[in-house]
Image (cartoon, rainbow, N blue to C red):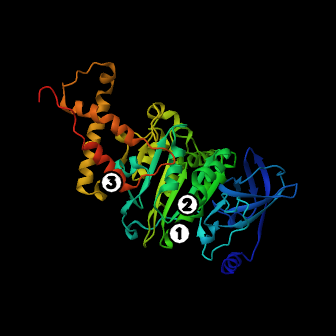
Amino acid sequence: MRALLAEIGALSEIRHYGRVVSVQGLMVEVAGPLHAMGVGSRLTVTSRTGGDIPCEVVGFRDGRALCLPFGQLSGIGVGCKAEVIAEEPHVYPSSAWLGRVVNAMGEPIDGKGPIAQGAEPYPLRNMPPPAHTRQRVRGKIDLGVRAINTFLSCCRGQRMGIFAGSGVGKSVLLSMLARNTACDISVIGLIGERGREVQEFLEDDLGPEGLARSVVVVATSDEAALMRRQAAYLTLSLAEYFRDHGKDVLCLMDSVTRFAMAQREIGLSAGEPPTSKGYTPTVFAELPKLLERAGPGTGSGSITGLFTVLVDGDDHNEPVADAVRGILDGHIVMERAIAERGRYPAINILKSVSRTMPGCNSEEENTLIRKARTLLSTYDDMEELIRLGAYRPGSDRLVDEAIFYQPSLERFLGQRKNEATDMASGYAMLANILSQTPPAREDD
């Protein structure tokens, strides 16, 4: 009832109407009461077939509002009525959203009936808490994947990126994190994903127990650019609601790149100039606004954000990846060469970093990780010579140790999809590997 009263109170006493004067591609130009519209305002255009198509104002030109639809433009033509319905869209989350699957408009798509709405409105395009009022990241969070738990330890409230090309296994890694992470609530945004994979993710990867403590927001690749972009905004709004109620939230988004592609489509339609690889300036303005919303709040709650980034052509320095890497608190790099030799998750430990890890680990843990990284780095530097048989055993003590430990470390970094390893067990396994004594050298 409080939610209904809040919606009624938000209704305007005056209804504003305009008319469609042009349709070019996906862009709908509306003439009418421009004083009642702003960028981000919502309109409903009544098509000639009688259906209402929601649109959003993305710009203005020559005294007309430039609008993009949330659906198909079938039946819209010159003269169709356009009604201004909202200045700023909101969502009304509640605990009843847990266990549900919704679209970018917040409408349930799981066939379980309507969702009870909360009383407090949350704007879809919210601002992050002021930097000086935020809590610091605190305490390590157990992600259930031993390669990350040990070499790339994360804190509650940290934001990490998972960078990978197509088919390298980032979606499978994301499913492992969704199922195994020790958190109160998960909010999962599937942005621009294949429709075939949605049900597989819900049933096989997340499962009934995982879904019961999660909210899943879905916008598949065939949906309009506005729907894909709004799905990302809705994901963060739901995470903010649970964070503000003192929960430790895991926010998973797959993927930020498709959010950027959706924003590129919107920007190009509005007449923005393309810059790097066709991305418009608003793409790089919107990325920090979206990603900064994750993190610790002003109270006891936090949002731990894990965002996948689809790197174009396995180029980890392409524009979106480069921009996201500079915003987040660390990056997990997955490489095709590692996946091709059959080790999953295909994480390149040497190219990955967690910026909060040294401060949240004990001195013993940091010493253990430094030793393991040194061995991995030494083997990586000499790998080509070792495989060609050009390295003579006994020439270098550190290289000999790296060769000895490499098979055990490689097995440690690999993990089956349905396997989970807690943080303490991961460090114990790594310590046990490094406690093994290499065979004596001839010159000893």
Q: Pointers 3 and 2 in contact (CB under 8 A)? A: no
Side of 425 relative to 304 (left or right):
left
Q: Is residue 140 left or right of residue 69?
A: left
Task: Mark 3 or mark 1: name the one nearer the start of the chain.
Answer: 1
Instruction: Say if residue 266 shows up in the picture.
Output: no
Depth check, front residue: 177 or 79: 177
| Residue type (three-letter) at the residue carrying disc 2 | Val
Helix, strand or loop at label 1? It is: helix
Residue picked out by circle 3? 357
* Image: 82 above or below 133: above
Sequence-first disc among 3 and 2: 2
Look at the numbered discs 1 and 2 and tell me whether their residues touch, using CB distance below 8 Å. yes
Kind of residue indicated by mark 3: Met
Residue appearing at x 71%, y 54% in the figure: 70
Q: Disc 3 and disc 2: Cα gap in Å? A: 24 Å
In terms of image quadrants, where is residue 59? bottom right
Identify which residue, 364 or 20, lies in the foreground.
364
Ranked by sequence position, the earlier of labels 1 and 2 is 2
Other residues around mark 2 within 10 Å, as few (<14) / some (14–19) / many (≥20): many
On-image quarter of the N terminus = bottom right
Q: Which residue is mark 1?
A: 242
Tell me which residue sits at (51%, 48%) in the image: 418
* Residue at numbered disc 2: 187
Say if mark 3 contacts mark 1, CB within 8 Å: no
Indicate the position of residue 94 as horizontal and vertical percent values: 61, 72
Rate crowding at label 3 as few (under 14), some (14 to 19) or many (20 or more) other CA atoms within 10 Å: some
- Is residue 203 placed above or below 408 in the rendered structure? below
Q: Position of residue 65 (x, y in %)?
A: 70, 56
